[in-house]
Amino acid sequence: LPLQTKEASNIKDRLIKFEIKVGEFRLEFQNNCPYNVQECSAEIIQQSYEKIHEYYVRTCELENEAQELNNLEILFDIQKSSYKQLKDCRNELVSLKYMWDLISLVEFQFENWKSTLWDKIDTENLMQLIKDMQTKQCNPTSAINKDIKNWRAFTALNDRVKNMNTILPLIAQLHSKFMMERHWKKLMKITQKEIAFQSPKFCLEDLIKLQL
C-alpha cells in the first residue's frame, strides 16, 4: 500500500507537469497556426498546410501521452483529466484544414480565370460562379463557416471574392461588342496605363492589374 501511495503521488506530479505542458502548447498553437494569414499565394498556401500538419503531428503526440496518463488515473483511482485545450486544438485543426482547402480552391479558381484569353472570357458564367462563392462556400453566415468566420484569413478571402465580384461587371462592359478602339484609348488615358487590348495574349489578368 505505501508503494501504491507513492506511485499515485508520482503520477499526480506527472499530471501537473503535463497540464503545464498542454497549456504552453495551446498558447504556442494559437500564436503560430495560420488563422490570420491575410496574404495569399501558392507559396503561402503551402506554408499554411505545412504548419497545420506540423501541429497535427504534435497534437497527436500529446493526445497519446494524455491517453497514457488517463489510463494511469483509472488504474490508481485518480479523477480523470479531460484536457479541454487539446480537444480545442484538435477541433481547430479540422477547421483550419477546411478553411485552407477553401482558400486554396478559390485561389486556384481565380488564377485559372486570370489566364483566360480575352476572346475566351465568359463573363456571365464567371459572375454566376462568383455569386455561388458568395452565397455558398464563402458565406460567413453559413453554418459550415461558423467556426472560421472571424478568422482574418477567412475575412481576407471574403474580401478577395467581393473584389472579384466588383471587377467582373466592369469587365463584362469592356467585353461588350460595342466596345470600340476609342473606348480603350479613353480607358488608357483614365488609368494612365498601356492596355495591349489587340494582343493575342491579352487576358483577364491584364485588366485586373489595372485596378479598375
Image: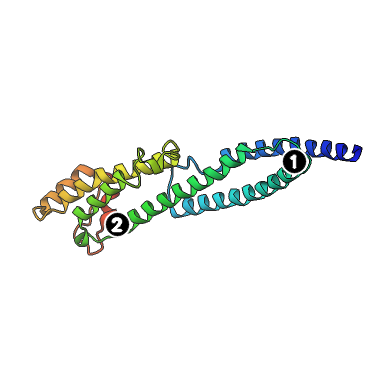
- N-terminal label among 2 and 1: 1
Q: Residue at x 44, y 38 (%)?
A: 152
Q: Residue at x 51, y 47 (%)?
A: 94
Q: Residue at x 91, y 37 (%)?
A: 2
Q: Secondary structure at mark 1?
A: helix
Residue identifier under label 2? 113
Q: Report the mark closest to the observer, 2 or 1.
A: 1
* Callout 2 crowding tier (Cα within 10 Å): few <14, some 14–19, many ≥20: some
- Near-viewer residue (27 or 9): 9
Instruction: Please identify the quadrant where the N terminus is shown.
Output: top right
Q: Secondary structure at mark 2?
A: helix
> What's under tag 2, amino acid-wise?
Trp
Residue 152 at least partly seen: yes
- The picture places residue 78, in percent across and down from the top left corner, at 75, 36
**Residue 123 falls in image quadrant:** bottom left
Residue identifier under label 1? 73
Q: Residue furthest right?
A: 2
User: Do labels 2 and 1 touch, CB within 8 Å?
Assistant: no
Q: Is residue 194 above or below residue 156?
A: below
> What's under tag 1, amino acid-wise?
Glu
